[in-house]
Amino acid sequence: MWLLNTSKGAFVPLLSYSKASLLACCMTLTMQANAALADNETITTSQTQQQSPGATTEVSSTTSTGCTNSFSYQFFYKNSHVGNIHRQQKWQRQQADMTTSGKVSFLMFNFTGKHQSKVYWSNTQQQYLTREFKQEVKGLTDTKVSAWFSDNGLVSKVTANDEKTEYSDFNQPILDFEAISAQMRQNLINNTKEFDFLMQKSDELGHYYFSVVGEEELNILGKNYRTIKVQQVKKKDRKLYLWFAPELDYQFVKGTYKRKIIDIEAKLSKFDLGCTKTNN
């Protein structure tokens, strides 16, 4: 996902979307976050924490040994196939090198991108954190972003096209979308119904909220699975839903996002749960 500033270089006045924010919209679906994370939503101090400081989480065993998960997703704009996203997670104990790359083309937009991130489990914060990430987007303009995060996740240092900025929050760790992906899955394993994240963009922080709204049976690659349905909340101008399949290691299998003329759907098209095979 490429979470770049939409207030600069907006291409479609009706939507105030740049090519980076549209790609972020697509990528967020695959990242188990939300397709609106690239909006202008600056935040100075976070308001909530994901769990109490003294809580202890039982971390999923699928990340306890060296293994690799891989996923492919097809993207559709109003039922027309417009792109593909590929993800790979290389786990070693409770840390992972994660890579997401893809190409999306619809309306007048045509762009490609790659995001590489190091994610790890923090016993202090009792959640997944980002250690660092690098991302590159090519389209109307080329953008490169890199970021480093402190051990407690409360400070981030970002370099976007050679411009350096530092961010901090006293209450809640700052994450990239890959750490959000891992933590959202962990929350569902722990049967958490409400959760929120503070996410690092290229030049600001965004605070995003989610709620589990129920279960639904979906046909995934020719087989029916029970899925958990998650909705983004506290946003009245859009509708974002994410589906996760417990039988498929609580992984993201489908997402839909609608806002004004944007109508995007992501579907799992191929997967290899290497970590599940290793631990079984």
Image: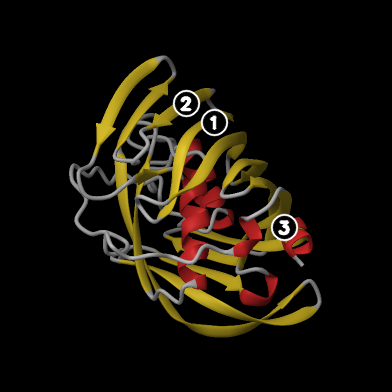
Query: For the residue marked with disc 3, what is the amino acid?
Result: Cys
Q: From this viewpoint, is residue 279 visible?
A: yes
The crowding category of the residue bearing disc 3, from other C-alpha atoms within 10 Å (few below 14, some 14 to 19, many at least 20), is many
Q: Is residue 250 above or below residue 150?
A: below
Q: Callout 2: helix, strand or loop?
A: strand
Q: What's the CA distance linking mark 1 and mark 3?
A: 25 Å
Judging depth in this view, the residue of 208 and 79 nearest the camera is 208
Q: Nearer the viewer, mark 1 or mark 3?
A: 3
* Secondary element at tag 3: helix
Q: CA distance from mark 2 to mark 3?
A: 28 Å
The image quadrant of residue 269 is: bottom right
Residue, disc 3: 275
Q: Quadrant of the C terminus?
A: bottom right
Q: Is residue 193 left or right of residue 251?
A: left
Cβ atoms at labels 1 and 2 below 8 Å apart: yes
Near mark 1 (Cα within 10 A), the count class, few <14, some 14-19 or many ≥20, is many
Residue labelled with disc 1: 135
**Residue 93 rendering spot, x and y as whole percentages:** 61, 49
x then y, percent, for residue 66: 71, 48
Indicate which disc residue 181 carries: none
Q: Residue at x 40, y 21 (%)?
A: 159
The circle drawn on residue 146 is 2
| Residue depicted at x 78% and y 80% | 223
Specify which label sits upstream in the sequence, 1 or 3: 1
Picture coordinates of residue 229, whole percent (x, y): 51, 76
Looking at the picture, which amino acid does disc 1 mark?
Gln
Mark 1 lies on a secondary structure that is: strand
- Between marks 2 and 3 in the image, the one whose residue lies nearer the viewer: 3
Residue at horizontal 34%, vertical 32%?
A: 156
Judge from the rendering whether residue 75 lies leftward or rightward of residue 193; answer left or right.
right
Q: Earlier in the sequence, mark 2 or mark 3?
A: 2
